Amino acid sequence: MEISTKQENKAVFEQEPTGNALFLRGTSETPEVILNKDKGYIKFSGRSLPEDAKSFYKKIQDWISSYAEKPKKGTKIIFVFEYFNTASSKMILEILDIIKIIESKDEKLTIEWHYLEDDEDMLEAGEDFADIADLKFSFISYE
């Protein structure tokens, strides 16, 4: 599924034939996304400023919603954003709403919010997301 029309920023989903895993290679405008049902693993990393955030995140939200129906015990969700725009922020909140469903079924759910050591804005964004969604995040700084 092609996501962006810009030649230099084409984002293409790669899906296992079983549908249990989905991978999106990151671009300068879209994050790398790893979704794996068998491992109970969801990861977002990089930059998120797609032209149409709603359509970009639609397939991701659909996959996470499907996963939320029967999540693996010990699901691990990792966010390592360098930057995201306002439209992406809204989509992240919608994804966190779906993660609330996973939390209700998986008492071992872990959510990690990684941020560059001196990026107080990204730390604050993670804290805000955790508060708004009423989810417990672990905050992890890196250099």
Image: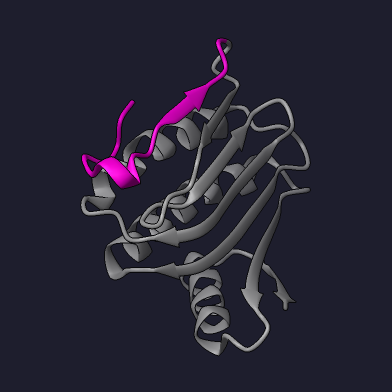
Q: Is 101 located above or below residue 78 in the figure?
A: above
Q: Residue furthest top?
A: 17
Q: Nearer the viewer, residue 85 or 91?
A: 85
Left or right side of 141 for 15: left
Image quadrant of residue 16? top right
Q: Is 44 located above or below residue 72 in the figure?
A: below
Instruction: Specify start and end residues of the magenta stretch as a single range.
Output: 1-17
The residue under the point 70% across, 36% down is 40
Give how far across and how far down residue 62 sits, in percent: 40, 32
The residue under the point 43% across, 38% down is 60
Give how far across and how far down residue 99 sits, in percent: 54, 49
Q: Nearer the viewer, residue 22 or 101?
A: 22
Q: Nearer the viewer, residue 132 or 89?
A: 89
The residue under the point 34% across, 60% down is 88
Give how far across and how far down residue 29 sits, in percent: 36, 56
Quadrant of the rendering where the N terminus is positioned: top left
Give how far across and how far down residue 15 sits, in percent: 51, 22
Q: Is 14 located above or below residue 42 in the figure?
A: above
What kind of secondary structure does the magenta stretch mostly adopt? loop
